[in-house]
Image (cartoon, grey):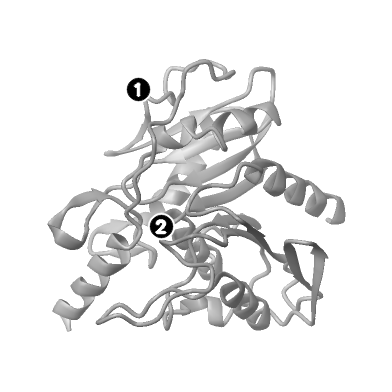
Amino acid sequence: MKTVRVALALLFFGALWVWYLPPQTEGLEATEYACGAPETPCTIGERTYHILVPRGEGPFPAVVFFHGSGQSGADVLGYNTVGQPLLERGYAIIAPDALDVTYAGGKNSSGWIWEGRRGARNDHQFARDVIADATARFPIEQDELIIAGHSNGATFVWYMACAGALPNQRDFATTGGTLVRGRPEKCAEVRRGFNLIHTHGTRDQVVPVNGSQRSGSWTGWQGAHESVDALAAASGCTRQETVAETTTRWSRCRTTGDYRLVLGDGGHEIPQDWVATVTDWHTGLKTQR
């Protein structure tokens, strides 16, 4: 059984290994602090995170962004679809660093443990620690956070949201990463209201938009629509509607959640309009509270 679990982990994390162009962090319009920049991460015990804060007095809303496999929080700051666009909209960006996992073929590189805890390592607790530290140390609005992630980081965010691992957070945004097929965990029995917007490229070859099937011991990915639809069903949502050409919304939910799926024609990358899509969604939810 242990061998099977290890094999599943290798396949799961190995499937998310993607090469990216080096991010550009020079010229970002952010306030300088003693820690948080790409070269000077903030530390919590033996772990680290990065942060960019807009210039001005604050406090500022923020996006906590969990990177994909093989990446780092420093990389996230320089994504041209994340870092500067968030600063321009008055949002800080908090980007934690994952520890290494073992990928298929024996390669070690960074990745998140989607179930939260494995042995002495507890990634859910680390996420809570990062939020607590960043909101205490920087001018961040504690009630104005969006918890987000891409690829492996998106899958991690899905399971954190469903498990209530971040009990004070309501708004979650995932892109390019879905639930694991056959492993719904707490997403099949949602009892706590939260909001989630998922974006996905229809040409994604790493985590296909329509999901994938079993291959050996790997059970495959759920499709994007399949994942959001299952979450909405577990949340008792009674209405599904197309609110824009590429957007589906589930509402009138027993848990008062708002769930959306936004499809684009891209591949396994963060969409160019991701920041606008997510922050506009978040702002709209605020007006309903």
Eyeballing the image, is 21 above or below 160? above
Q: Quadrant of residue 258?
A: bottom right
Residue drawn 32% across the image and 54% down it: 17
Residue toward you, 9 or 92 = 9
What kind of residue is marked 2? Answer: Asn
Residue drawn 71% across the image and 42% down it: 276
Q: Quadrant of the N terminus?
A: bottom left
Question: SS of the residue at dot 2?
Answer: helix
Q: CA distance from mark 1 to mark 2?
A: 23 Å
Q: Residues within 10 Å of mark 2 (few under 14, many from 20)?
A: many
Residue drawn 31% across the image and 67% down it: 12
Give percent across and percent down for residue 147. 57, 51
Q: Circle 1 is placed at which residue position?
A: 39
Residue drawn 51% across the image and 69% down it: 163
Residue toward you, 127 or 113 = 113
What kind of residue is marked 1? Answer: Glu
Q: Quadrant of the C terminus?
A: bottom right
Q: Quadrant of residue 225?
A: bottom right
- Using the image, tell me which numbered label, if any, was put on residue 230: none
Eyeballing the image, is 206 above or below 45? below
Q: Residues within 10 Å of mark 1 (few under 14, many from 20)?
A: few
Q: Quadrant of residue 205?
A: bottom left
Looking at the image, residue 145 sits to the left or right of residue 203; the answer is right
Looking at the image, residue 191 sits to the left or right of residue 153; the answer is right
Give percent across and percent down for residue 280. 76, 46
Eyeballing the image, is 264 above or below 185? above
Looking at the image, residue 144 sits to the left or right of residue 222; the answer is right
Q: Circle 2 is placed at which residue position?
A: 152
Query: Of label 1 and label 2, which has the lower sequence position?
Result: 1
